[in-house]
């Protein structure tokens, strides 16, 4: 830092490095390092073709089929409907037309875009990354600015490799101490969102800090940043450190060994300076966080597994009282109901939140030698995660426990590919959203960690994994 220069946040440093110009009204024109594309991008490509444009920087654009892909086969013909099969085929055609790197259904690099990008070394510290999916915030775990965009913005990035953006305010979330047994990054995020609300980080970028975060693996940090969007943050970030560098090194699109030392020296700059001022500070005590579960239809409707369904009348805000009452009606739950022991119909382990190899290891460790008593499926986050889980014997553990072992994709998180929870069914899910109908019309979703999902499958009800 130059003498007399004001201390800067990590966000400020990366933003300044990518700002081409600033409009007098406030927005910045940012250079975009990576544009991640999935099969919902046909609108953006139609716009380019209509205007006679081509992708400006094809090597900085990566296409991954994930939202609509079948998990019971690897051909577009295996899709849930002819319309979805056409969408997957159109995606392949658009990738070829644009001359873009493309991880299609049969590729070893296929998977959920937010799992594939870090896994392949596409996500690197200090980059700006966009994708037409809100959970692009996941990539910030490696010290990047990463956020979701709409299809008109996607067309702009494809054509110009730039985007107009208003710089968000900064929020630092510090997680102190250590976590208790059975408590994970998913529980930290549900505890945070329960504390600040589903709109609590609106207009902010969250930087996660503190000893708990520093001790987290990259996979756990990816879960934190993934769910920052569920608190309405523009994106989440974790400053790069030795854990980050060790994770990135040797990945396919990471800097070569010849470039490595210079890259790391540059990445080390992307930490918030001592004395940097944040617009808001939030502190969580790790020891106070328990395994969490949601009871309503927003991620903020979360309590410890040993808690009870709240009475809507306890909330101060009239709107919250009204929404809580509606949630309980939809979820068919009565105030005061204990969550530990609540009967379930299904379990889903997967999604861009919790489908990485560490997540599967955590679930398999609970399942070893036990049997699921309700239908349960596991959808790995990528083909490579699937292969690794098979090599490690995790897949066999899942299958012996009675789980369905599927191909990679978004699956039952977004319920766009035919994998759905039935009307009125109650599902313990490792995904990030429990909105009305998110997992299918009339589906009732309880968000939990992978270990909690495994415990639910073998007990047939929401269960405190710490007992197992």
Image: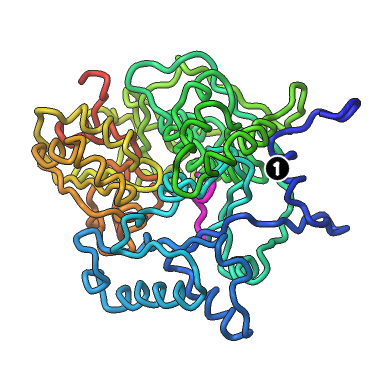
The scheme the figure's colours follow is: rainbow
Q: Position of residue 456 (x, y in %)?
A: 21, 34
Where does label 1 land, which residue?
14
Q: Is residue 343 visible?
A: no
- Pick out the residue farthest to the right: 4
In this orientation, which residue lies closer to the viewer: 147 or 49? 49
In this orientation, which residue lies closer to the viewer: 314 or 98? 98
Q: Main secondary structure of the magenta part?
A: helix
Which residue appears at 24% of the width and 54% of the height? Answer: 407
Q: Position of residue 169 (x, y in %)?
A: 72, 41
In this orientation, which residue lies closer to the viewer: 374 or 163? 163
Range of magenta residues: 132-138
Q: Is residue 387 visible?
A: yes
Q: Quadrant of the N terminus?
A: top right
Residue 365 position by quadrant: top left
Horizontally, is 70 left or right of 314 in the view?
A: left
- Pick out the residue farthest to the front: 258
Which residue appears at 48% of the width and 21% of the height? Answer: 215
Horizontally, is 337 left or right of 200 in the view?
A: left
Q: Position of residue 62 (x, y in %)?
A: 49, 61
Compared with 131, 225 (above or below) is above
Which residue appears at 26% of the width and 63% of the height? Answer: 70
Compared with 228, 110 (above or below) is below
- Report if residue 153 lies within the magenta region: no
- Report if residue 136 lies within the magenta region: yes
Which residue appears at 33% of the width and 50% of the height? Answer: 382
Horizontally, is 165 left or right of 337 in the view?
A: right
Rate crowding at label 1 as few (under 14), some (14 to 19) or many (20 or more) other CA atoms within 10 Å. many
Q: Position of residue 340 (x, y in %)?
A: 26, 27
Q: Under tag 1, what secondary structure?
A: helix
Compared with 5, 70 (above or below) is below
């Amino acid at each position: 830092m130059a003498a007399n220069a004001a201390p800067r946040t990590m966000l400020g440093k990366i933003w300044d490095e990518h700002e081409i110009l600033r409009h007098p009204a406030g927005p910045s024109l940012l250079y975009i390092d990576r544009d991640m594309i999935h099969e919902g991008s046909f609108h953006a490509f139609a716009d380019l073709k209509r205007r006679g444009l081509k992708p400006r920087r094809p090597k900085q654009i990566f296409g991954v089929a994930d939202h609509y892909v079948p998990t019971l086969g690897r051909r577009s013909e295996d899709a849930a409907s002819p319309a979805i099969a056409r969408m997957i085929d159109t995606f392949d055609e658009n990738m070829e037309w644009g001359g873009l790197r493309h991880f299609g259904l049969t590729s070893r690099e296929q998977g959920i875009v937010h799992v594939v990008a870090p896994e392949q070394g596409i996500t690197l510290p200090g980059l700006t990354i966009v994708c037409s999916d809100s959970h692009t915030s996941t990539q910030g775990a490696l010290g990047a600015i990463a956020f979701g965009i709409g299809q008109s913005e996607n067309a702009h990035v494809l054509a110009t490799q730039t985007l107009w953006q208003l710089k968000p305010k900064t929020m630092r979330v510090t997680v102190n101490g250590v976590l208790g047994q059975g408590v994970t990054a998913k529980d930290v995020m549900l505890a945070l969102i329960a504390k600040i609300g589903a709109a609590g980080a609106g207009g902010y970028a969250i930087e996660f800090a503190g000893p708990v975060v520093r001790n987290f693996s990259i996979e756990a940090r990816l879960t934190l940043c993934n769910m920052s969007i569920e608190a309405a943050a523009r994106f989440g970030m974790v400053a790069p450190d030795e854990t980050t560098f060790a994770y990135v090194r040797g990945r396919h699109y990471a800097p070569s060994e010849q470039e490595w030392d210079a890259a790391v020296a540059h990445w080390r700059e992307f930490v918030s300076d001592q004395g940097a001022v944040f617009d808001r500070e939030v502190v969580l005590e790790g020891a106070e966080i328990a395994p969490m579960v949601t009871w309503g239809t927003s991620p903020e409707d979360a309590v410890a597994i040993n808690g009870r369904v709240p009475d809507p009348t306890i909330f101060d805000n009239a709107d919250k009282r009204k929404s809580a009452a509606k949630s309980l009606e939809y979820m068919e739950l009565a105030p005061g109901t204990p969550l530990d022991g609540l009967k379930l119909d299904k379990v889903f382990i997967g999604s861009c939140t919790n489908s990485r190899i560490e997540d599967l290891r955590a679930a398999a460790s609970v399942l070893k030698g036990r049997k699921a008593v309700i239908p349960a499926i596991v959808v790995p986050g990528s083909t490579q995660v699937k292969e690794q889980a098979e090599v490690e014997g995790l897949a066999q553990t899942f299958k012996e426990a009675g789980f369905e072992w599927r191909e990679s994709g978004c699956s039952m998180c977004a319920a766009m590919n035919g994998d759905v929870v039935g009307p009125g069914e109650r599902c313990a899910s490792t995904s990030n959203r429990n909105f009305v109908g998110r997992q299918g019309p009339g589906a009732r979703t309880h968000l939990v960690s992978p270990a909690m999902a495994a415990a639910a499958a073998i007990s047939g009800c929401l269960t405190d994994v710490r007992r197992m």
